[in-house]
Amino acid sequence: MDTSLFESVDQYISNLLGGEDAVLKSALKSMKDAGIPAINVSANQGKFLQVLARLKGAKKILEIGTLGGYSTIWLARALPDDGHLITLELEQSYADVARQNIIKAGLDPVVDIKVGKAMDSLAELDAEDEGPFDLIFIDADKPPYTEYFEWALKLSKPGTLIVADNVICEGKVLEDTHEDERVTGVQRFNKAVAANKQVTATIMQTVGTKEHDGMAIIVVN
Protein backbone atom coordinates (compact mmCIF):
# COMPACT_ATOMS: atom_id res chain seq x y z
CA MET A 1 0.00 0.00 0.00
CA ASP A 2 1.30 3.45 -0.94
CA THR A 3 0.97 5.43 2.27
CA SER A 4 2.45 8.65 0.92
CA LEU A 5 -0.98 10.17 0.25
CA PHE A 6 -2.20 9.30 3.76
CA GLU A 7 0.93 10.82 5.28
CA SER A 8 0.60 13.96 3.15
CA VAL A 9 -3.04 14.44 4.16
CA ASP A 10 -2.11 13.80 7.79
CA GLN A 11 0.54 16.51 7.53
CA TYR A 12 -1.95 18.86 5.86
CA ILE A 13 -4.41 18.41 8.73
CA SER A 14 -1.65 18.79 11.30
CA ASN A 15 -0.37 22.00 9.72
CA LEU A 16 -3.87 23.39 9.49
CA LEU A 17 -5.42 22.30 12.80
CA GLY A 18 -2.91 20.22 14.73
CA GLY A 19 -1.63 22.86 17.10
CA GLU A 20 1.59 21.00 17.87
CA ASP A 21 3.53 23.78 19.58
CA ALA A 22 7.11 24.04 20.82
CA VAL A 23 6.28 22.25 24.07
CA LEU A 24 4.90 19.21 22.28
CA LYS A 25 7.76 19.17 19.77
CA SER A 26 10.21 19.38 22.66
CA ALA A 27 8.48 16.41 24.29
CA LEU A 28 8.97 14.35 21.14
CA LYS A 29 12.64 15.33 20.99
CA SER A 30 13.19 14.44 24.63
CA MET A 31 11.65 11.02 23.99
CA LYS A 32 13.90 10.42 21.01
CA ASP A 33 16.97 11.57 22.97
CA ALA A 34 16.05 9.19 25.80
CA GLY A 35 15.60 6.24 23.45
CA ILE A 36 11.88 5.92 24.14
CA PRO A 37 10.11 4.04 21.32
CA ALA A 38 8.26 6.33 18.89
CA ILE A 39 4.92 4.66 19.54
CA ASN A 40 3.12 7.75 20.83
CA VAL A 41 -0.01 9.09 19.16
CA SER A 42 0.43 11.42 16.22
CA ALA A 43 -0.25 15.14 16.50
CA ASN A 44 -3.62 14.71 14.83
CA GLN A 45 -4.54 11.86 17.14
CA GLY A 46 -3.47 13.95 20.13
CA LYS A 47 -5.67 16.80 18.96
CA PHE A 48 -8.51 14.31 18.44
CA LEU A 49 -8.17 13.13 22.04
CA GLN A 50 -8.15 16.73 23.22
CA VAL A 51 -11.33 17.49 21.26
CA LEU A 52 -13.01 14.41 22.74
CA ALA A 53 -12.04 15.49 26.25
CA ARG A 54 -13.36 19.00 25.63
CA LEU A 55 -16.55 17.62 24.10
CA LYS A 56 -17.02 15.37 27.10
CA GLY A 57 -16.30 18.23 29.51
CA ALA A 58 -13.92 15.89 31.30
CA LYS A 59 -12.69 16.97 34.74
CA LYS A 60 -11.15 13.64 35.72
CA ILE A 61 -9.04 11.74 33.16
CA LEU A 62 -7.21 8.44 33.51
CA GLU A 63 -4.49 7.47 31.05
CA ILE A 64 -3.12 3.93 30.95
CA GLY A 65 0.29 4.21 29.31
CA THR A 66 2.23 7.47 29.76
CA LEU A 67 5.35 6.82 27.64
CA GLY A 68 7.03 10.25 27.42
CA GLY A 69 3.94 12.29 28.27
CA TYR A 70 3.06 13.43 24.74
CA SER A 71 -0.58 12.30 24.79
CA THR A 72 -0.74 13.29 28.45
CA ILE A 73 -0.08 16.91 27.52
CA TRP A 74 -2.73 16.87 24.80
CA LEU A 75 -5.32 15.48 27.23
CA ALA A 76 -4.35 17.62 30.22
CA ARG A 77 -4.67 20.77 28.16
CA ALA A 78 -8.37 19.99 27.78
CA LEU A 79 -8.96 20.04 31.53
CA PRO A 80 -10.70 22.92 33.30
CA ASP A 81 -8.85 24.73 36.11
CA ASP A 82 -10.19 22.28 38.69
CA GLY A 83 -9.44 19.21 36.55
CA HIS A 84 -7.10 16.32 37.31
CA LEU A 85 -5.36 13.67 35.21
CA ILE A 86 -3.78 10.46 36.50
CA THR A 87 -1.45 8.62 34.13
CA LEU A 88 0.06 5.16 34.65
CA GLU A 89 3.51 4.13 33.44
CA LEU A 90 5.46 0.92 34.02
CA GLU A 91 8.96 2.21 33.26
CA GLN A 92 10.51 4.61 35.75
CA SER A 93 12.85 6.06 33.11
CA TYR A 94 9.91 6.85 30.83
CA ALA A 95 8.00 8.41 33.72
CA ASP A 96 11.00 10.61 34.55
CA VAL A 97 11.06 11.97 30.99
CA ALA A 98 7.29 12.43 31.02
CA ARG A 99 7.44 14.31 34.31
CA GLN A 100 9.93 16.82 32.93
CA ASN A 101 7.81 17.30 29.80
CA ILE A 102 4.70 17.85 31.89
CA ILE A 103 6.54 20.37 34.07
CA LYS A 104 7.73 22.24 30.96
CA ALA A 105 4.13 22.32 29.77
CA GLY A 106 3.10 23.90 33.08
CA LEU A 107 0.74 21.01 33.77
CA ASP A 108 2.36 19.41 36.80
CA PRO A 109 -0.28 20.85 39.19
CA VAL A 110 -3.01 18.85 37.44
CA VAL A 111 -1.14 15.68 36.40
CA ASP A 112 -0.18 12.79 38.66
CA ILE A 113 2.11 10.04 37.31
CA LYS A 114 1.90 6.64 38.99
CA VAL A 115 4.81 4.28 38.26
CA GLY A 116 4.47 0.51 38.36
CA LYS A 117 2.45 -2.29 36.84
CA ALA A 118 -0.81 -0.87 35.53
CA MET A 119 -2.85 -3.69 37.05
CA ASP A 120 -1.49 -2.85 40.50
CA SER A 121 -2.02 0.88 40.00
CA LEU A 122 -5.58 0.33 38.78
CA ALA A 123 -6.35 -1.79 41.84
CA GLU A 124 -4.93 0.96 44.05
CA LEU A 125 -7.03 3.62 42.32
CA ASP A 126 -10.12 1.49 42.89
CA ALA A 127 -9.24 0.87 46.54
CA GLU A 128 -8.62 4.58 47.07
CA ASP A 129 -11.96 5.52 45.42
CA GLU A 130 -10.20 7.68 42.84
CA GLY A 131 -12.95 7.02 40.33
CA PRO A 132 -15.19 7.47 38.57
CA PHE A 133 -13.34 9.11 35.70
CA ASP A 134 -14.96 11.07 32.91
CA LEU A 135 -12.52 9.88 30.24
CA ILE A 136 -10.14 6.92 30.19
CA PHE A 137 -7.48 6.52 27.50
CA ILE A 138 -5.91 3.07 27.05
CA ASP A 139 -2.62 3.04 25.15
CA ALA A 140 -0.31 0.52 26.77
CA ASP A 141 0.87 -3.07 26.28
CA LYS A 142 -1.66 -4.93 24.16
CA PRO A 143 -1.93 -8.45 25.67
CA PRO A 144 -3.88 -7.26 28.76
CA TYR A 145 -6.10 -4.76 26.90
CA THR A 146 -9.20 -6.72 27.92
CA GLU A 147 -8.22 -6.54 31.58
CA TYR A 148 -7.52 -2.81 31.24
CA PHE A 149 -10.99 -2.44 29.76
CA GLU A 150 -12.53 -4.34 32.67
CA TRP A 151 -10.74 -2.07 35.14
CA ALA A 152 -11.82 0.97 33.14
CA LEU A 153 -15.43 -0.11 33.56
CA LYS A 154 -14.95 -0.41 37.32
CA LEU A 155 -13.57 3.12 37.39
CA SER A 156 -16.35 4.54 35.21
CA LYS A 157 -19.87 5.87 35.54
CA PRO A 158 -22.69 6.16 33.01
CA GLY A 159 -21.45 8.48 30.29
CA THR A 160 -17.74 7.82 30.85
CA LEU A 161 -15.83 7.81 27.57
CA ILE A 162 -13.22 5.08 27.11
CA VAL A 163 -10.81 5.34 24.17
CA ALA A 164 -8.39 2.56 23.27
CA ASP A 165 -5.65 3.01 20.67
CA ASN A 166 -4.03 0.49 18.29
CA VAL A 167 -6.95 -1.91 17.96
CA ILE A 168 -6.65 -2.67 14.23
CA CYS A 169 -2.91 -3.43 13.98
CA GLU A 170 -2.56 -2.72 10.25
CA GLY A 171 -5.49 -5.04 9.57
CA LYS A 172 -3.86 -8.02 11.27
CA VAL A 173 -6.92 -8.35 13.49
CA LEU A 174 -8.64 -9.94 10.48
CA GLU A 175 -6.39 -12.98 10.74
CA ASP A 176 -8.03 -15.80 12.69
CA THR A 177 -4.72 -17.16 13.91
CA HIS A 178 -1.79 -14.94 14.68
CA GLU A 179 1.43 -15.53 16.61
CA ASP A 180 1.87 -11.91 17.72
CA GLU A 181 0.48 -11.56 21.24
CA ARG A 182 -0.15 -7.87 20.61
CA VAL A 183 -2.56 -8.78 17.82
CA THR A 184 -4.27 -11.54 19.79
CA GLY A 185 -4.53 -9.15 22.73
CA VAL A 186 -6.47 -6.54 20.77
CA GLN A 187 -8.56 -9.23 19.06
CA ARG A 188 -9.63 -10.43 22.50
CA PHE A 189 -10.29 -6.83 23.57
CA ASN A 190 -12.40 -6.05 20.50
CA LYS A 191 -14.52 -9.15 21.08
CA ALA A 192 -14.93 -8.28 24.77
CA VAL A 193 -16.12 -4.78 23.91
CA ALA A 194 -18.55 -6.10 21.29
CA ALA A 195 -20.03 -8.58 23.75
CA ASN A 196 -20.37 -6.14 26.64
CA LYS A 197 -23.90 -4.85 27.18
CA GLN A 198 -22.72 -2.10 29.54
CA VAL A 199 -21.32 -0.02 26.69
CA THR A 200 -22.07 1.47 23.29
CA ALA A 201 -18.99 1.32 21.08
CA THR A 202 -17.45 1.54 17.65
CA ILE A 203 -13.98 1.43 16.12
CA MET A 204 -12.66 4.16 13.83
CA GLN A 205 -9.93 3.18 11.38
CA THR A 206 -7.01 5.58 11.32
CA VAL A 207 -4.42 6.19 8.62
CA GLY A 208 -1.58 8.66 8.36
CA THR A 209 1.89 9.02 9.80
CA LYS A 210 1.08 6.11 12.17
CA GLU A 211 0.12 3.98 9.17
CA HIS A 212 -3.04 1.84 9.36
CA ASP A 213 -4.61 1.29 12.77
CA GLY A 214 -7.73 2.20 14.71
CA MET A 215 -9.20 3.61 17.90
CA ALA A 216 -12.07 2.11 19.86
CA ILE A 217 -14.54 4.73 21.04
CA ILE A 218 -16.63 3.42 23.95
CA VAL A 219 -19.36 5.08 26.02
CA VAL A 220 -20.52 3.49 29.27
CA ASN A 221 -24.32 3.10 29.28
Image: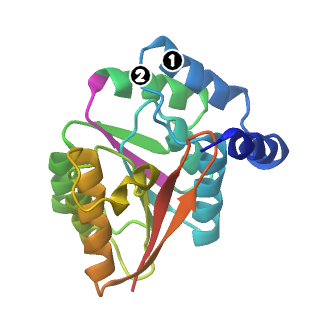
- Left or right side of 121 for 48: right
Q: How many marks?
A: 2
The crowding category of the residue bearing disc 1, from other C-alpha atoms within 10 Å (few below 14, some 14 to 19, many at least 20), is: few
Task: Choose top left, top right, bottom left or bottom right for residue 114.
Answer: top left
- Check residue 36 in the rendering and tell me which mark sits there, or answer none: 2
Q: Is residue 90 magenta?
A: yes
Characterize the magenta stretch by its predominant secondary structure. strand
Q: Can the viewer see residue 79?
A: no
- Between 175 and 101, which is closer to the camera in this rendering? 175
129 shown above or below 94: below
Residue 162 belongs to magenta span: no
Horizontally, residue 127 falls left or right of residue 164, namely: left
Residue at x 35% of width, y 59% of height: 173
Look at the image and give the residue range highlighted in magenta.
84-92
Which amino acid type corresponds to the residue marked 1 in the rendered image? Answer: Lys
Q: Position of residue 196 (x, y in %)?
A: 27, 81
Percent position of residue 57, x then y: 59, 68
Q: Nearer the viewer, residue 157 or 39?
A: 39
Element marked by disc 2: loop
**Distance (Cα) linking label 2 and label 1:** 6 Å
Disc 1 on helix, strand or loop? helix
Quadrant occupied by the C terminus = bottom left
Give the residue type that dot 2 points to: Ile
- The spot of residue 99 in percent (x, y) is 44, 28
According to the image, label 1 marks what residue? Answer: 32
User: The N terminus lies in which quarter of the figure?
Assistant: top right
